[in-house]
Image (cartoon, rainbow, N blue to C red):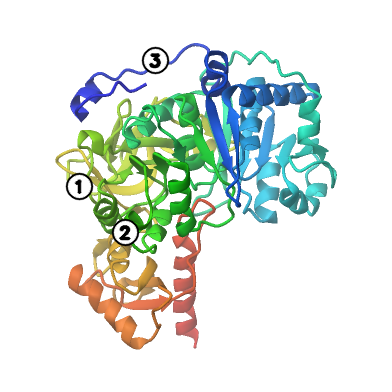
Amino acid sequence: MLQPASDYETLTANFRWSLPEVYNMASAVSDGWAASAPERLAIRQVAADGSQEDWSHGALNRAANRFANVLTAKGVRPGDRVALLLPQIPQTAVAHLGAYKTGAVAVPLAALFGLDALRYRLADSGARVLVTDTAGLAKLAEIRDTLPGLDLVLSVDGPGDGAESFEGLLSRASDRFETLATSPDDPALMIYTSGTTGQPKGVLHGHRVLLGHLPGIELSQNFLGQDGDLLWTPADWAWAGGLLNALFPALSLGVPVVSYASRKFDPEFAFRLLEMQGIRNAFIPPTALKMLRAVESPAKRFRLNWRSVGSAGESLGRETYDWFASEFGFPVNEFYGQTECNAVLGSAAAIGVSRSGAIGKATPGHEVAIIDDDGNALPTETLGQIAIRRPDPVMFLKYWNKPEATEEKFIGDWMITGDQGVMDEDGFVHFIGRDDDIITSASYRIGPGEIEDCLIKHPAVALAAAVGKPDALRTEIVKAYVVLKEDAQADTALEDSIRSFVRERLSAHEYPREIAFVDALPMTTTGKVIRRKLRDLAREEMADGLTS
């Protein structure tokens, strides 16, 4: 959708949205390429032993047609929910595309979800169909009797435990199917997102969500779609980051995608995969990039062919940005959004839109501002809430079964994010922290990102998170939870060293007055630190101190 330009101003001035009356994600991702270039590579599945299986656009489309016919024969109708509990494998793409073809709504679920998380999402969505594997079936067996609306379970590993064979049913179905002529606003995809309070909310998107993502993803990959482009992401395809920051935009642009099913991110293997496959483009979330820093001299040890790396999901930070640019000779293109409205701020080093510590400028086609609590746009260099003006093609339709929550997401025509930020004089937005992540200490409002960014510069620190701990004198103090590198020894001397390190580099009010060494930080399935759990832990420590 973007017309490549040499500068941001020209790119933005020349951009116009063009939403057709009829639009289906399956047509955009698969049908067109299957008709015009059926032998073109779509997905390359890499196994743990290094072997690979290539799926052409023709093969992908025929499999999706077969699945669409299976769903139709089983009574699935437009608007019905089809849940997918699968890892990063081609069958995941097949199931998505087949559901879209019928007008059903795909509900991706992370393979790492526990029983309660699965039960809630399957029940709340009212999913009629679940496609999963052997591991998913084992979980489902413990909760299926609580899900009376789940009519059909299919397993990509074959029949068993109340499931029919996914491949068996597809093999007997026709590979021809006429994709439903949906509108851009017809429901297509529902991704559950967790807030700081209450149960997770189903974020319902229309088919236009793919169109809405394209400018931001093209931008963050330095105009994705060039000859020889090949994309990979370690992000789970059950997450908006894996699906909409990588898989579907790439396929729709004719860029092949490398898939690798892994339960745990291995930074050493990531570099081997990048080298082995000659991957040119990658979407790598910030936590994974920070883990890559632990690999010694990767630019010297591996012959890498990449030309662009995009990153989003949480703040990247100056330290990781600067390390990457120094190590590999080009910067990470950080971008920003939420499951509800994604890729609305972005960077593109190819046209000079790149700044250490910033999450980007407004992506062409999106109006983003820093607003106050009344919905008024604030001047530059003023702290406020990041907001996006509606209507916007990438914006969600609603929260599933939660009209009040949907209404509360807006102040007038501004969709509020709950993220605090500042826009500088050049239009770059700097992320400060979530509303509930902001630490108030001795009248100072402190964002955790800058502290965490400083902490990981310390030679002994691998990962870190900063939260506010209640304090009678200062309201809150900064408490840091730190994961050390393998060769570091946790003791009082190191604690003092880290504390002084931050104090000297930031300020006397931002350094962590308390430090706790931990084996791991609580993470979401998408690799974000769950600061809420750390805040709860800090509050419990405070309460224990008062009662002891």
- The residue depicted at 58 percent of the width and 40 percent of the height is 45
How far apart marks 2 and 3 lie (CA) works out to 37 Å
378 and 281: which is toward the camera: 281
User: Which comes sooner in the sequence, label 2 or label 3?
Assistant: 3
324 and 2: which is toward the camera: 324
Q: Give neighbour class at mark 2: few <14, some 14-19, many 20+ (Cα, 10 Å).
A: many
452 and 228: which is toward the camera: 228
Q: Give neighbour class at mark 3: few <14, some 14-19, many 20+ (Cα, 10 Å).
A: few
Which residue bears the numbered disc 3?
18
User: Which comes sooner in the sequence, label 1 or label 3?
Assistant: 3
How far apart marks 1 and 3 lie (CA) works out to 34 Å
- The nearer-to-camera label among 1 and 3 is 3
Q: Is residue 413 visible?
A: no
SS at mark 1 in the image: loop
Q: Give neighbour class at mark 1: few <14, some 14-19, many 20+ (Cα, 10 Å).
A: some
Q: Are marks 2 and 1 in contact (CB under 8 Å)?
A: no
Which residue bears the numbered disc 1?
382
